[in-house]
Image (cartoon, coloured by chain):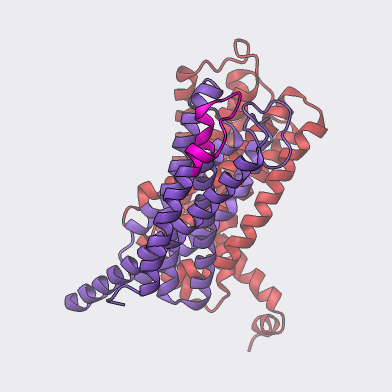
Amino acid sequence: MQTKPRLLTVLDFVTAALFVLATGMVFFYAPLEAVMGQVQRVFYFHVAAGWVGMLSFLVAAIAGVVYLTSTNRKWDIVSLSAIEIGIVFAFINIVSGSIWARPIWNTWWTWDPRLTTATVMELIYAAYLMLRQGIEDPDRRARFGAVYAIVGFVSVPLTFFSARLFRTIHPIVIGTNEAGAEGDFDMTPMMLQTFMFSLLTFTFIFADLLWHRIRVGRLADKVEQLRLKTIE
Amino acid sequence: MTRDTQDTVRNPLLSFSRALSAVVWKDLSAEMRSRELLSAMLVFALLVILIFNFALDLDPKTRQESTITAGVLWVIFTFAGTLGLNRSMAVEKDRGCIDGLLLAPVDRSAIYFGKTIANLVFMLIVEIIVLPIYSLLYNVNLFQPGLLLVTLLGSVGYVAVGTLLATMAVQARTRDVLLPILLFPVVLPIVLGAVKASGGFLDGIEMAEIRPWLNLLVVYDIIFIAIAFMVFDFVVEE
């Protein structure tokens, strides 16, 4: 516990190398998109960040279920760690999307289903952090956190579906587009490779950050327990 | 052993429904005596109408689209609903009633469903009073069977999630501000579906176009009643 595992150090270096490589691919390997130009390059990390956001919240919800059935504090730390990472990446996703949308849609923001869902997701998990902050008892905090992580995650697809009943203009790059999607494009093989590589890289970043955050969480847990002991 | 208890021992469903109705009845009779919850919700609802009247122009003659009516109605219901949910759980917590309830040898889900049904009754009472007042003030007929159905479906989902989250919120330090923050992002599909469906009924749109929204409300209700039922134990556990 005290010493950093060898494997984590390896993962750190691999992740850093992948990230440098992915950035290089985005700027130099992937061809320039004909219509949108340079701003299209945001797409690779934009989608990858969104993917990490969703993955984090999924991990958090699953860890929440496992915590409720096992009441092992370890899973509460996993859930909280995943949510903190998810909030950051979902935010990167929103901001990078806005940067892309300004020249392509001619607006920073529109109430498209994906954008709406992304915002609501951020708000749900901000509420999650506030809920945790308001509770002192560690066990109760863990239980409530797990319950809210589950409830929040289940509501996300419903939010997406309900917002989708309005017409969408967000492009779907993989799969078929609805008529009226603005800013869509077909990927060339080199674009697809860059895209897949970005997804892989960001998944590594997620795993690496999660591991670090869990270690910090365990230490914080220990500190809290020691503090509670001295109060008693 | 009296006949009553013999019956309940033999039939678990009967004992469940008895516990359930006891919880509901406790809430309703407490409210009948104090009337603090309903009066607060109602006055608040009227104040929201008043504020919207001046913040937005609510006259349907100048406002052609009826989405504004549906929207304002659901803002009233969600805000007044939060007030009611918070109060209904805070009363249990403050006077230590929740501990008494939990000590009772009944299934915890009976407590959840009892509180949910009581909260639903309060919300429906508020809605039944607000709808005619709104109809009267703005000269629109809100008493259409479709609209009433949407109101019911929306309220069921809202209260099902709201009761669960209010139970958590009252146990936190920042409880008064916490409930709306927890509830609103999760309950968004209900608000969206209810506003679109009520607007559709008010505009007299074809049923085929309203049905997806009704389906959404029903699906939401079922999913969240099921989830709340499963996790409520963890929320009240000591």
Position of A27 compared to A172: left or right?
Answer: left
In the image, residue B154 lies in the stretch drawn in magenta: no
Depth order, front residue of A190/A49? A190
**Residue depicted at 32% across the width and 57% down the height:** A133
Depth order, front residue of B35/A104? A104
**Residue depicted at 60% across the width and 40% down the height:** A191
Position of B48 compared to A167: left or right?
Answer: left
Relative vertical location of residue B73 with respect to residue B98 in this rendering, above or below: above
**Residue depicted at 75% across the width and 39% down the height:** B212
Please provide percent x and percent y for residue B71.
58, 29
Residue B193 visible to the viewer: no
Q: Please tell me in which quadrant of the rendered image residue A229 appears.
A: bottom left
Please provide percent x and percent y for residue B226.
64, 61
The red one among the chains is: B
**Residue depicted at 48% across the width and 72% down the height:** A67
Q: How many marks?
A: 0
Single out the residue that lies furthest toward the left. Answer: A230
User: What range of the chain is rendered magenta?
Assistant: A25-43
Chain A colour in the picture = purple
Please provide percent x and percent y for residue A218.
33, 71
Please provide percent x and percent y for residue A43.
54, 37
Single out the residue that lies furthest toward the front. Answer: A29
In the image, residue A40 lies in the stretch drawn in magenta: yes
